[in-house]
Image (cartoon, coloured by chain):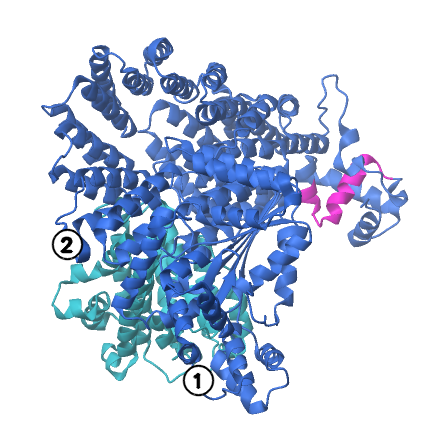
Chain colours: A cyan, B blue
Amino acid sequence: MDEPVWGPVHQDIVGLLADHPADVPAVVDHLTKLQDLLVRLPPLERSCPLADFNELYLTITTSVLNGLYDDRFADPVFLARLDVEFAARYFDALRYWTESSPVTPRAWSCLFRRMRGPDARPLPSAAAGVNAHINYDLPFALVTTFDSLESEPVDGSEQHHDYLEINQIFAERIPELRRGYLDNWQLMIDMLNGDIDDWYQGELVEYTRNVAWRNAQKIWRCRHDPEARECERERLDDNAAALGRLLLSPLGAFLQ
Amino acid sequence: MASDVDTAPLVGRAGQVATLRSALLDDVGPGQTAAVFLTGESGVGKTRLLREVGDGLRAAGALVLTGACLDIGDASPLHPLLQALRRFDADLTASHARTSSAVRGLLQMFAEETGGPDGAGALLERVSRGLHLVAQGRPLVLVLDDLQWVDRSTRQLLLYLLAGLGDLQLSVLAAVRAESLQGAHPLRRVLTELRRLRSVRVLDLAPLDRADTERLAAEIVGGPLGAETAESVWQRSGGNPFVVEELARDLREGRDGLSDTLREVFLARVDALPEPAHAVVHAVAVGVEPVAHWLLAEVTRLPEEELIDAVRAAVAHRLLVGDDDGYRLRHRLVAEVLAHELLPAERSALHRRYAEALTSVPAELHQARLAHHWRLAGEPARALPAAVAAAGEAERLHGYAEAHRHWSVALQLADAPATGASAVDGSLDVDRADLLRHAAEAAHHCGEHARALALLEELATADGAPPVCALHIRRARYLAAAGRSAPAEAEYRRALAAADCTSRERAAAAAHLAELLLHLGRYADAGERAREALELAAEVDGSVSEVVLASMALGFSEAYLEDPDAGLAVMREALATAERSGRPEDVACAYLHLAELLTGPLNILEEGVVVARRGAERVAELGLGRTYETRLLAIATNGLFRVGQWAEAEKVVAAALRHRPSGADAVELLLARCRLWVGYGDIEAADRDLEAVATVLAGGGARHVIPLLTLRAGLAMWQGRHELARQAVQRGLTESRSDDVGILAALVWHGLRAEAEAYASRTVPVDRTAVRRLREVAERVARKSEHAVRSVRDVVDGFLALCDAELSRLDGNSDPALWARSVTEWERRHHPYPAAYSRLRQAEALLARRSRTATAGKLLRQAYQVAQGLGAVPLSTEIRTLASRARVPLEAHGTSVEGRSPADAEPAGTELAALTAREREVLAAVAEGLTNKEIGQRLFISERTIGVHVSHIFDKLQVRTRVQASAIFLRNRPE
């Protein structure tokens, strides 16, 4: 507790996190600034596992922003809000971690804990971040977005279509990281997107990609019931944390 | 009653107390609003801080109302406000007779409220009037605890009041558990939007630091702590004041080292309780807080003396607190510890006792609580009627979200296998179809479209299902509300084809279908259906609503298909029919549609404004002022703004806002008024309205976001804050649909204008990427608008003309021909304001090319006359500045306006007295660091002439460098 969580860049990060970006250009700006700080975090600096994730996330969010400017989506209001809300959850997790708060999602803390070492492979690190972000944050971000737009998650809707379009962006960007390991990566992403149970049941790729969406629909139905909502949150957090730990274990290295 | 055996001191929060006090009272001007949302983990001391600050504000003369939200998921609408009012009333003494009668009047109003269409907005208005009476001119502070459990109605009320729509000086202080915001909480998004506003603060309450932890512990223990003890308290509590306090109390009582976790601390205390106190604590844990004394007596079945002893023991062990309105567990954390201590059978037995006790005596939240307890007692048959009654109660207060939850519970109960006592009676006697019908309608009203449709499917197969045609119409209505137009269209067609369809239903279905097709842009189809609907309606008496709706669809489709006269005639005829034999709502709708038709696609603005105002008077006579008069006046305001009658528009919008509208109506009017403020250059007023709009929009919806951002950008440009304007436009571009071409075109123009202004001001570099993007969007808009209807295309063309011209300005070569084209576009549509702006720029471009100076002068004079007539201060100022730079006289008789040029307006210092006005202008530009070439461009004279001026200046001031000359200028600059 005596040394600040973020070492020499602690004050910078606290200052950055005090701001809450409210639109997609601001999110991109925020992630860029964060990246500059993370790579200065000793002892790992450029190989900081969180920086690996942050970089990937920045790349993807920039693609989303360009997509918004280029009229790629049917319902940009939905997608822009979703993107902001989605990012807010990552920033929240960082904020909780900064405050050493006991409510830091477990899905994230397993990655944060590795920030100061030991060194982890970049691909599993980025994957662990993607895991926390998609399996834990995304369903809630979806629910909040629909709620604020007075809309709802309906299969086959414009929003659903845009949502799947984001999957496309992930698919476009991720292989760039390491094209040669595409198969392993694909396998891992598919596994990540689902509960372990679902995965063992041998369900298909398409199905598992939709798990966050389906989880959002599940939460949507019980969103007025604080107890059920919390129960669902715990479940998602536990699942994502279990997978995150697996990714960051020596086993995760098989990705590289 | 002893509410607290002894209160621990408030440690480490002095800063927050002061911040909150100034944010909620001292810094809030008359008629303004403010809010602080306090977030933090459980036990961090939110409630304690609320109390402390509330007491302080009360002592400072504010009227403080305190309430708390409830965690039973099916609480009733506006519960925290009602609770706060009742508590406040109970605390009033006889000397406050006037306040007391105001409070009772307000409570009575709630009791007498009857549900019905459009009533939700009227209720908000009445609540704010009631609070006004209660406050009697004092600042009002609403303190709400546990906001994470707030119901939707209260949420909307808070946003309404904070937006200033209630015309009330109000501050809100609310506490939210940080943990709850983690998941999918509806407040998350609301807070994200609100925290950007000046009047709102979100304050995160962190745990205490190590020094404060030790101070707090030492204060409780009554002496300094040993180093080891202090370390252990710090380690175990993590600075959470609630935990620190409990650990310290154990320390003081010599129980050190026994308990490692809070759970153990409390379990040890529960174990130490005498038997009756044990029962009391568990009973309260099962109840809905606060549990009244009489209720606790009934549930625990303890004799009075014993009960009081038991309560005292529980309070002494710091598990329970008592207040005037009843008992609560000391802390939410205690409830979590106790939750697992009872066996299921024990819990349901307690619920049964609560239900039985409540059955005999009606109490606050009567039906909702009865339903809750009977359900958890495992008695669906008895819970069911209570749930139905609670749903009815919620609908009475327009709380459809809450009502929907109660109806859903009722359905679950009806489907539950009968157990326990009710099993003996056999199955439940309920009309399942009736429950489904209500549940579906409530879901539809609160925007749960998918759920409404699912319930309708169930209804279709239930016994006693409505006839086929009625079902199709209903399904179509729900689908259309969900924005699923294609399946909605199919449903209307099925309704029309259904064998059991009555003529009335057929007319209604055809009229709605026509409306739907209109929205889908299929104007020919819409017209055909509308004619069919009119024919059908002609055969049925009393189908005026259908006539009005079908005429609207026909009128608009004709207008879009460019036969304006035919459409207009139909709509006028419908108005006559409505006046002859319709309900008041039919008359109001007819006026509304006619005014929309005139000011919208037909662009016959003057007549549209007249119709809207006449309609507003008429509907006020008919008693529909709040809903329809407001909307009609909004149309009139926007029309008046466009034709350039701003003073009149200002009057009309003020009249419309007197109804204290809410929701989309309020947003529409505030945006209309803000447009005026931006035009006038009244920055403060514009800012206030923008904040109000943002506050209302934080509650949900996205339709008005782009107009809001456009106005924000426009305002920022008049302030010279190009960066801000750019940000607003950027956000707008990422959040707008590309098919809203009209709205998007206006936004793009603002973006390009912001870049052009940045270029002209030389203070901010031009963002070339932004320009490229704006160019792309402009091209896209142009492409898409080719397929749009004429009226939309006209608007788009006007803005695109502006965009093209701004682009030429950005290249440093503003093209007078492009500006002239923009003048023509806007003149053609009779919009004087953008036309005047275009004239200004055309003149500027001509002057920069030093050609046709006479034309430029004429343009400036025309623009100036319009701007002056409108009262458009910032535009007038720009015109004057340009005229003075170019030495163009603006007044009719050739009187030069030079006397009013900025460099001349203020008395110059003595050192500058020798300079001419022109030399002073040149010197001002020199002091800004401009080169001779740049000064020449600005003042429309050649670079060489500037050189001459500069040498004269040097002579007169007896200096040798520009820096020295600038120094003299700055020294003598009037402050």
The three-letter amino acid code for the residue at tag 1 is Ser
Q: Is residue B802 left or right of residue B654?
A: left
Rendering quarter of residue B4 = bottom right
The three-letter amino acid code for the residue at tag 2 is Ala
Q: Position of residue B461 (x, y in %)?
A: 11, 39
Magenta span dominant secondary structure: helix
Residue in the image at 80% along x and 49% along y: B970
Residue in the image at 20% along x and 10% along y: B539
B650 vs A79: above or below:
above
Q: Nearer the viewer, residue B414 or B245?
A: B414
For label 1, the SS is loop
Q: Is residue A162 visible?
A: yes
Rendering quarter of residue B103 = top right
Rendering quarter of residue B595 = top left
Residue density around tag 2, few if under 14, some if 14–19, many if 20 or more, within 10 Å: some
Q: Position of residue B65 (x, y in %)?
A: 56, 50
Q: CA distance from mark 1 to mark 2?
A: 47 Å
Disc number at residue B423?
Answer: 2
B780 vs A3: above or below:
above
Q: Is residue B813 visible?
A: no
Q: Nearer the viewer, residue B101 or B837?
A: B101
Residue position marked by numbered label 1 in the rendering: B259
**Label 1 in the same subunit as label 2:** yes
Residue density around tag 1, few if under 14, some if 14–19, many if 20 or more, within 10 Å: some
**Sequence-earlier tag: 1 or 2:** 1
Span shown in magenta: B915-935
